[in-house]
Image: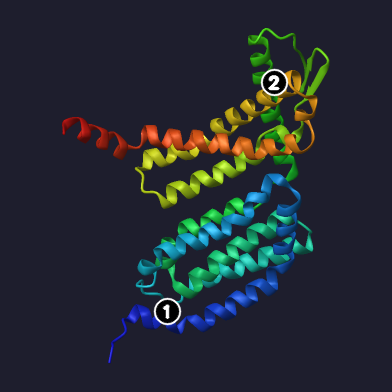
Amino acid sequence: MTARSPAAGASARLAVPAVVAAVLFVALFHPILWLRASQYADDPRYSHCFLLPVISALWIYDRWPVLRRMVVAPSRVGGAVLTVGVALFVYSRLLHTNLGQHVGLLLTLVGGVWALCGSKMTRACAFPLGYLVLTIPLPRVWDDQLTQPLQRFATVVAEGAFDAMGWIVVRQGNVLQLPGLKLLVEEQCSGAHSLYALGALGFAWVAFVPRPLWLRVVLVASTVPIAMLANAIRVTGTGVLAYRVDPSYATGASHQLGGMIVFAIGLGLFLLVDWCLRPDAVATENDDVAA
């Protein structure tokens, strides 16, 4: 006969309540979950959000041998947080406030884990729970306030690059006028999608890959200038191809492909920053020199 640990026994006892809680969660929040899925599918800036719950689940799967050994116990404080989350969701739904519904959903999720498993498990799962904050779409006003400076930055950098090449270029707002070609840096060209995706990637990277705290902060913060630089490179490259090769490169499928190119450039730059700064790489090089 094999004896089970108290933690394993408690986890087994919570299996049925956890399944019931999950069913109730989906039943209550399915309107806002459906709204999220629809927005992710329609708005390229948030299409990466489909992967964020998967990343949270992978983190839990990766840490499961440790998590399953933790002693779990119901918490009244967690129950209170759960109640506040549900109340916020219902109130926001009556007022048709999407942001409040999103926040209520996440607060309910945190409260549910806290109520069923206790504060220790909730702290241990701080990353997968907190990471889901990135699935909340920004209000349109905030989105526009972020998008416009990104558009302007990409336009100014592209103008400087064309001027450095000796081309005649006139900038009017987010429009670059070249001889025989007008290049419009549209909202879709702002790089907001790449910024959001790279930011989410940065948080996931520092959660899965062991790094000193200072390097984690630097890596996450670096995603902002990296995304801006990658998008400026994309806009400049698109302009060069449209001006020198074929104007169709600034429109259609070639234009849409630019988003993936920006992310690829940004990912390469992000990994380069990590490689240059990570202490283990420096230590390995020093060991090789000493040998």
Quarter in which the C terminus is drawn: top left
Q: Is residue 29 above or below residue 53?
A: below
**Residue at 45% of width from left, 84% of height from top?**
13
Image quarter of residue 260 = top right
Residue farthest front in this picture: 245
Residue at image location 76% in from the left, 38% down from the top? 253
Q: Can you give x and y, in whole percent of width and height, for residue 39 in the image?
A: 74, 53
> Going 42% across and 61% down the picture, which residue do you hit?
123
Residue 40 circle label? none
Q: Nearer the viewer, residue 172 or 169?
A: 169
Label 2: which secondary element: helix
Identify the colour scheme used. Answer: rainbow
Residue 72 point in image, percent of width and height: 40, 75
Quadrant (top left/top right/bottom left/bottom right) for the N terminus: bottom left
Q: Along the horizontal axis of the image, is 201 left or right of 159?
A: left
Residue labelled with disc 1: 11
Count of numbered circles in the view: 2
Q: Which SS class for mark 1? A: helix
The picture places residue 105, in percent across and down from the top left corner, at 64, 63
Q: Residues within 10 Å of mark 2 (few under 14, many from 20)?
A: some
Separation of marks 2 and 1 at Cα, in angstroms: 60 Å
- Indicate the amino acid at tag 1: Ser
| Label 2–label 1 contact, CB within 8 A | no
115 on left or right of 212: right
Label 2: which residue?
240
